[in-house]
């Protein structure tokens, strides 16, 4: 387990848009992400859903075809995250839920404070990813997929049973 996180509460693997998807739920301290999401209620238990989509191309050596695959994964993540958020808020309007647009690092629905980029050390510290320095840049890798992946992230605070039910309908 990465330092500072309580472990994985759920692992799911499904096939989506010709890519393998792995979702993992982490419970890092809400204060660790307050600079990214100032509206996040720090008194609630934070659930962070990390969605990893396996790609055919390595994101470390980005070709035109790899760039297209990354954009397709971004689009699929944004669509899925929007549906997940809508279902979650329909179930309980008191919940906090927002996701990071992986293209920009900015929250999709909250007042922006600071972007959460794929090179942010919190991916490694709290969310089970590894950051690798390539000399020219830094890339994120997944324990199973290596650099052949694209990741997205959803932040939720509130009743985790509602969140789990909404996640089951997404993946």
Image (tube, rainbow, N blue to C red):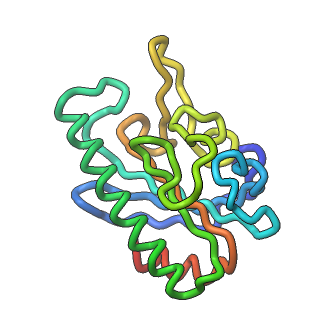
User: Residue 136: percent from the left, percent from the top?
Assistant: 45, 13
Q: Residue at x 44, y 50 (%)?
A: 101
Identity of the residue furthest to the top in this view:
135
User: Residue 94: percent from the left, percent from the top?
Assistant: 65, 81
Q: How many marks?
A: 0
Q: Residue at x 28, y 27 (%)?
A: 62
**Relative side of 31 to 135, left or right:** right
Q: Is residue 92 depicted above or below 115 in this figure?
A: below
**Relative side of 158 to 100, left or right:** right
Q: Residue at x 37, y 58 (%)?
A: 78
Q: Is residue 133 depicted above or below 56 in this figure?
A: above
User: Residue 125: percent from the left, percent from the top?
Assistant: 69, 40
Q: Residue at x 63, y 45 (%)?
A: 113
Identity of the residue furthest to the front in this view:
111
Q: Quadrant of the C terminus?
A: bottom left
Identity of the residue furthest to the left in this view:
65
Identity of the residue furthest to the right in this view:
43
Q: Nearer the viewer, residue 108 or 67?
A: 108
User: Residue 143: percent from the left, percent from the top?
Assistant: 51, 42
């Amino acid at each position: 387990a990465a330092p500072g996180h309580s472990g994985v509460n759920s692992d799911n693997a499904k096939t989506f848009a010709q890519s393998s998807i792995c979702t993992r739920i982490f419970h890092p301290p809400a204060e660790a992400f307050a600079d990214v999401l100032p509206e996040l209620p720090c008194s609630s238990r934070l659930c962070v859903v990390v969605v990893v989509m396996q790609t055919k191309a390595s994101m470390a050596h980005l070709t035109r075809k790899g760039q297209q695959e990354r954009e397709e994964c971004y689009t699929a993540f944004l669509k899925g995250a929007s549906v997940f958020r809508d279902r979650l808020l329909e179930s309980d309007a008191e919940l906090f839920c927002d996701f990071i647009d992986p293209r920009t690092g900015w929250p999709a629905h909250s007042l922006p404070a600071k972007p959460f980029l794929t090179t942010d050390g919190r991916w490694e510290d709290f969310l089970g990813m590894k950051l690798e320095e390539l000399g020219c840049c830094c890339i994120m890798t997944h324990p199973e997929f290596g650099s052949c992946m694209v990741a997205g992230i959803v932040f939720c605070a509130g009743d985790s049973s509602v969140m789990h039910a909404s996640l089951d309908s997404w993946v």
